[in-house]
Image (cartoon, helix red, strand yellow):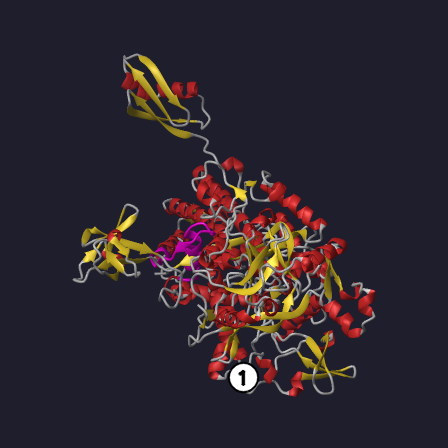
Amino acid sequence: MVRYNPTDIEPRWQAYWDKNQTYATPSLKDLPPGTKKRYVLDMFPYPSGDGLHVGHPEGYTATDIVSRFARACGECVLHPMGFDAFGLPAEEHAIKTGEHPRVQTQRNIDNFTRQLKLLGFSYDWDRVLATTDEQYFRWTQWIFTVLYDTWFDHDQQKGRPIAELSVPDEVSRQGEAAIEAYRDSKRLAYQDDALVNWCPKLGTVLANEEVVDGKSEVGGHPVKRIPLRQWMLRITDYAERLIDGLDELNWPSGIKKLQSDWIGRSTGAEVDFYLSTSADADVSTAPYEAFKRARSASGFPAKPGDDCLRVYTTRPDTLFGATYMVVAPEHPLIDKLVTPSQKGLVGAYREKASFKSDRERTDGDRAKTGVFTGTYAFNPADGRLIPVWVADYVLAGYGTGAIMAVPAHDIRDFEFAVEFDLPVIPVVDPPADHDQRDDILAGKACFAAEGLAINSGEFDGRTTDDVKSSLTATLNEGGLAEQAINYKLRDWLFSRQRFWGEPFPILHEIDSEGNPTGIKRAVPDDQLPVTLPELEDFKPHGRPEPPLAKADDDWLIVELDGKRYRRETNTMPQWAGSCWYYLRYIDPNNAEVFIDPELEKQWMPVDLYVGGAEHAVLHLLYSRFWHKVLFDRGHVSVPEPFGRLVNQGMILGEVEFSGYVDEAGKPITSKNVRKDADGNRVTKDGNPVEPVSYSEDEVQKKGEGFILKSDPSIKVDSRAFKMSKSRGNVVNPDSVVNQYGADALRLYEMFMGPLEATKPWAMNGVGGVRSFLDRAWRMMVDDGAEELALIDAVVDTPCDEDQRRVLHQTIRKVTEDTQAMSFNTAIAKMMEFTNYFTKSETRPREAMESFLILLAPYAPHLCEELWSVLGHSGSITKEAWPKWDESALTESSVEIPVQVNGKVRGKISVAPDASQDEMKEAALAADSVKQAIADKNVVKAIVIPGRMVNLVVK
């Protein structure tokens, strides 16, 4: 018997595709004029040591179907794959074992490649790349030098070469160092002090993902936030363009909103609060008056001096309600603000805050903490002195690192004011019918909405918007405030204190003593790539500086143009290589430029980009930023890299069933279990319970939930979880392929539901899809024969009318659904086709061939084999996509039941568009109906076009 055997078929056709380079990307210039291009891209994976799990192939299968479909439609398709290969796990492995990260990384890449080929994806493997390839990160480094050489012209709203930056005369007169410092202050790539996670016990700087609740993920040691010199990218200069560019993109609206919210454009005002020269709240206002006179003459400066605190607020209308100020523990003026009497308290508080993550500090549920600095500031709205506090709920990296606190109209400020007994002055009148109005006006509750101004001097009775603009304008006349646009987006911290990453192509000039002069330069293009040095080991050296600082002077020290330099020892983050890989796929082996301009014009932008929604913000935002810089500098021809974006949903582990038992082991229904004050699970009576797991065989479905088979009164919880090693619910695609075949896995992942939906895995579902493939095989193959042969039912005669209709309905449905990426409904239609023709005594070859071309993008191995069985020598991949015939979609006649007094007495055949009179006439002419009527009179005829005729007789 010759049965469908994927373990034989699939490897054979994968070898054929490799040998014949079936999926190599054609050159567009060699194709007929007008040939449409289709660039289909997956978000490339990080090659972890665990390999793929069944969640990964979902998006890859979707893009593979689209690519195969486009090729069949005559399009020129670029469908590449690569690896985002720099990453922390490989470095952690190197620290433990001493094995170079490159060794394990390549081992993982080899395994991923094997698994991807096992699933039959039609990638152009000649274009494969890894971000760790030296000839790849050579161009990553080159792009960084472009960023370093660029400044953003706000008037022209574009990036320009640093050589075109006009240096003020007063700066030029100060010499080369001052000129370089000025240029550095404008570059898109610059250095600044930024907080890093320093673990003294481990002796290394940790990435954010290596820190859990303020402790190292490895060992659980305390982690402290300390400032360290870091490379930053001035992405904030591009914030407006990054928002505006979203309008033209064919992306899900939810993803656009996530990006827009992350950038966080808001309109408000920057306001300067003059600091008191004394900690005495009754100090003379003379210095403040002098400050105001100077500001009134000079106007609002671009940068504040050390004599004031600058805040940004979206609610300048509430200035009269500011009763205190708060600065972040890391604020640069903190040492100036703290009085001698408060120095010890503030120092201890700052030290404690340094061990907290930003998430911990901004958690809304935690109690507010803080310390008074001893200093006051003048509220510019009314001249009142208000105290300046330091508190960790304010972050140095957000806004200016200082806030004016308006406890009557901001919940965090209100909680802080209540905690430390600070004044609460309402300045916005809530509606008369507000249920907390009395408490709000008494300063006992917070009101964050808009309304009419109160307790605001001349502005009383005016609307929020009116006070915002009027008060800002008044303060601006005095040089104390200015209308401003602000963004939540912060400049991108772009360096890591790790070994396994791209070295920065930057040189720091040093003097004869080896001390830095402050002058930097980029590594010349002809000396790229800067490769990683050879180190004796990869263990941390115990100091808060990068591991590359351990390298020998042969690598560290460079002589160039008669000067000595020290290499930059930070490395780039993993994001770097993923910011531009889509460009390198187009021209992966070019040693002269990062991409041939003509090829870039032919292929960009990416037509379809598919990946997980977890990359909705950072990866996409960073890639768009780099691309816009390259566009401004003339290196790419389009302003946006990704035209259409689709996010596949997550595939969860199999559904898990759980419940509870009491101390005696008796099952307790889950709806009667709650948490006590300590978080323990107890019954309604307070008796403790223990969680228990149930197998699928022990439960049964009832309504929307599940119950225990042995006791139907017990309700059981059911839930699917994200796949993870810790839960033990990871499904390896290798095992699925071994049991069911790659085509079954591909088809099942597309049949589970809409591509964008989150879906639980069910192994029995794979078996159901495999049964469909078995039926498709038996529809054409004589599985009772000793050797592979067509079944006798496959004939060379044309389709009859019904067969032709089913065929063309299937072609239309599968075509439209594949175009719409509604793969599950396309598969359902092909299942209907198979069921119909399996029952047919004859199966015309034309129908079988068209069906295989439709199914080929979904189940390519099976279709190649059956195409061969049908007598074809070439690959089905080269066949043109079938077109449907509109005239074949509808039936020439339909069978209609005829009722007499409600009972079916016969059937008639009429045209689908027959009128009511025509249907009635045909019914009365039918012999069986005549017999049923006999000598009775028809008193009424109920006719439903295309459905039925009911004759009422007496």
In the rendered view, does 286 fall on the left or right side of 897?
right
| Image position, residue 542 (x, y; %) | 53, 83
Q: Please give the range of residues in magenta.
A: 741-766
**Rendering quarter of residue 605:** bottom right
On-image quarter of the C terminus: top left
In this rendering, the count of numbered labels is 1
411 or 525, nearer to the observer: 411
| Image position, residue 526 (x, y; %) | 73, 76
**Rendering quarter of residue 178:** bottom right
360 or 141, nearer to the observer: 360
Residue named by callout 1: 541
Rendered residue at 43%/30% (across/down): 893
Q: Is residue 197 above or below residue 9?
A: below
**Rendering quarter of residue 7:** bottom left
Q: Secondary structure at mark 1?
A: loop
On the question of residue 594 being in view, the answer is no
Q: Is residue 206 above or below residue 306?
A: below
Amino acid type of the residue tagged 1 in the rendering? His
How crowded is the residue under tag 1: few (<14 C-alpha within 10 Å), some, or many (20+)?
Answer: some
| Image position, residue 540 (x, y; %) | 52, 82
